[in-house]
């Protein structure tokens, strides 16, 4: 029987690429969006779900289980970007980012675990970020929310292993998606002491996304993980130097690594 896959944030970008790739491989795929009516032409069903609204999560998960009788794979892909000097980023926006990038996946995981435990099988893939392995200037909140999800997965997978359920992280680097358009940007204030360095860094970040890798690279990585008998704890997907930056952080003295980052961002 074909495996049933739920992909949060499956209407565009990485989520859409994963969904289309898996559907071509014979999987039964469901994606989600807060506004599913906008995606009537999707190649797989898009259901209404907001990771910050537990009622919508429960409703969508139950809808899939009622129709398919099972739920084999969940890809926690829904997320939000945020940039800005931490000092000038409103607390409401910081909380909103954590609600989406950290508490959102927790809400989804809690909703699907009872069914997976009943099946004595399941795979949960949390899409994090290479940015979650390091505190990046003017992306500190994003780095922190994705880093928190990485650590959460490490703990969670040990707690659920007795139930035949696997969990893993996939950390993408920069991909050519529309994430920058939906990202919260702390405004560039004329009287801000951060105006020039933040403005320069913001431009550099947007260029990285515009010139990022093809999202199909992530789709193929997820497909490979699904077909791995015992997935690893962490996977990194992206250009060599982006992945190598994690290795450098592990082996270099902290201040040397910090200097490399500051040189990269011209700070």
Image: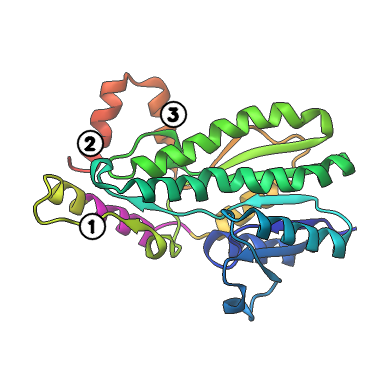
Q: Name the front one of labels 2 and 3.
A: 2
Q: Reading the chain from its start, which is encountered first: label 3 or label 1? A: 1
- Residue 63 located within the stretch drawn in magenta: no
As displayed, is residue 178 above or below residue 120?
A: below
Q: Residue at x 31, y 49 (%)?
A: 90
Asked if one can make out residue 171 in the rendered structure from this viewpoint, the answer is no
Q: Residues within 10 Å of mark 1 (few under 14, many from 20)?
A: some
Secondary structure beneath label 2:
helix
Q: Which residues are magenta?
A: 201-213
Asked if one can make out residue 113 in the rendered structure from this viewpoint, the answer is yes
Q: Name the front one of labels 2 and 1.
A: 1
- Quadrant into which the N terminus falls: bottom right
Q: How many marks?
A: 3
Q: Is residue 67 left or right of residue 137?
A: right
Q: Reading the chain from its start, which is encountered first: label 2 or label 3? A: 3
Q: Residue at x 86, y 54 (%)?
A: 70
Q: For the residues marked 3 and 1, what is the alpha-carbon distance in whole angstroms?
A: 33 Å
- Quadrant into which the C terminus falls: top left
Secondary structure beneath label 3:
helix
| Residue at image mark 3 | 247
| Residue at image mark 1 | 187
The picture places residue 223, in percent across and down from the top left corner, at 69, 52
Q: Which mark is residue 262?
A: 2
């Amino acid at each position: 029987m074909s495996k049933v896959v739920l992909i949060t944030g499956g209407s565009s970008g990485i989520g859409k690429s994963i969904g289309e790739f898996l559907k071509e491989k014979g999987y039964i795929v469901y994606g989600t969006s807060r506004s599913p009516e906008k995606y009537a032409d999707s190649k797989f069903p898009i259901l209404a779900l907001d990771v910050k609204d537990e009622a919508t999560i429960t409703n969508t998960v139950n809808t899939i289980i009622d129709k398919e009788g099972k739920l084999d794979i969940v890809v926690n892909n829904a997320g939000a970007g945020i940039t800005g000097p931490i000092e000038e980023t409103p607390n409401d926006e910081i909380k909103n980012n954590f609600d989406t990038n950290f508490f959102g996946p927790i809400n989804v995981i809690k909703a699907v675990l009872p069914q997976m435990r009943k099946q004595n099988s399941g795979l949960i893939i949390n899409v994090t970020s290479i940015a979650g392995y390091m505190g990046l200037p003017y992306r500190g909140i994003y780095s922190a929310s994705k880093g928190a999800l990485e650590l959460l997965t490490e703990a969670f997978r040990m707690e659920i292993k007795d139930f035949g359920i696997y969990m893993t992280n996939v950390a993408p680097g920069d991909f050519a998606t529309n994430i920058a358009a939906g990202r919260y940007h702390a405004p560039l204030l004329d009287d801000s002491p951060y105006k020039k360095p933040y403005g320069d860094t913001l431009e550099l970040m947007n260029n990285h996304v515009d010139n990022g890798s093809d999202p199909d690279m992530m789709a193929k990585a997820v497909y490979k993980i699904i077909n791995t008998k015992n997935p690893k704890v962490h996977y990194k997907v992206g250009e060599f130097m982006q992945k190598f930056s994690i290795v450098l952080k592990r082996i270099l003295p902290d201040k040397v690594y910090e200097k490399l980052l500051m040189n990269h961002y011209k700070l």
